[in-house]
Image (spheres, rainbow, N blue to C red):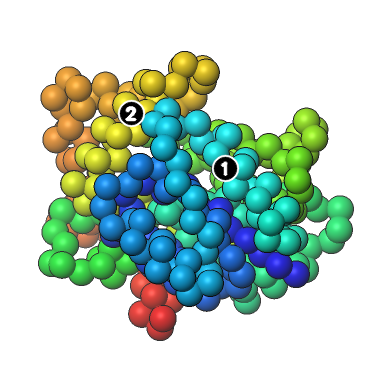
Amino acid sequence: MRLVMTLLVRDEEDILRANLDFHLARGVDRIVLMDNLSTDATRDIAREYERAGYLHYLFQRHDDYAQSAWVTEMARRACVDFGADWVINADADEFWLPHSGSLKDTLGALPEHVQAVSAPRINFVARTRSNGEPFWRRMNVRRASSLNYFDEPLSPKVAHRARADVVVAQGNHAVDFGGEPIKAEPAAIDILHFPVRSRAQYRNKIVKGGRAYARNTQLDENVGEAWRHLYAVYLEGRFDEECRRELLTDDEIAEGLQSGGLVEDNRLSLVMGAL
């Protein structure tokens, strides 16, 4: 069995190397990465893994966040160009962790009729202090219930068997094969999710993502609703309010742990420490 992962990235230098090392150690054979106008060291990191033979690098020059089309292109390349049997379409802030064994073991053991699987995302919280530590060392606390910006259950992500006619939906939450929606069965995989890691990273994400969505005239305005809302908040000069909501002090984390709203979770730090 051959497992290929796609990654759509933009300015992910603080997390990309950890993401690549983690998934390669969990059974991913090849990574198809599309760089959408990064201005930090993202390209240099990706090229390093490309030279080592682990990654295929693509550059995306458009700035309208046409994620469905871009990820669909990568997923089809995974099938046609790199001989994938299964494809995981991930973001740089997502770490797909199987409950046991490797990702290849988990997906390879599925019966033939299962064409796609879903995995829940688990949100980890950022601290206001960093002390220069990598994100995976300081972010060892997660929400007891992972909700989106509007306090709704966080949508799972989908992995699928490789197909040359696959279409990946915006957000990587669903797929269809040849125009037919594919049911995703629950998988024994958790996605450890680190969407906010620092004030600077969060601001950059909101501003560039919000502007990109605003340029896209093809998508319904309900698509990317949270990102659009956060960009509007930024334009109104209320970004610091969002930081206070997303980046917690040590005292706030201690209170959350005591109340049960937060849970200590060292799974990623243990894996990364071992690597």
> Badge 1: how crowded within 10 Å, few (<14), some, or many (20+)?
many
Residue 9 lies, in percent from the top left, at 41, 48
Residue 60 lies, in percent from the top left, at 45, 41
| Earlier-in-chain disc, 1 versus 2 | 1
Left or right: 1 in relation to 67: right
User: Is 180 or 195 nearer to us in this picture?
Assistant: 180
Q: Amino acid at mark 2?
A: Gly
* Residue where numbered disc 1 is placed: 71
Image point (14%, 35%), residue name: 240
Q: CA distance from mark 1 to mark 2?
A: 19 Å
Residue 58 lies, in percent from the top left, at 49, 50
Image point (34%, 56%), residue name: 42
Q: Is residue 35 above or below residue 62?
A: below
User: Is 252 or 35 nearer to us in this picture?
Assistant: 35
Disc sitting over residue 210 in the figure: 2
Image point (51%, 20%), residue name: 219
Q: Amino acid at mark 1?
A: Val
User: Is 240 or 79 nearer to us in this picture?
Assistant: 79
Left or right: 15 in relation to 152: left
Quarter the N terminus occupies: bottom right
Image point (41%, 81%), residue name: 275
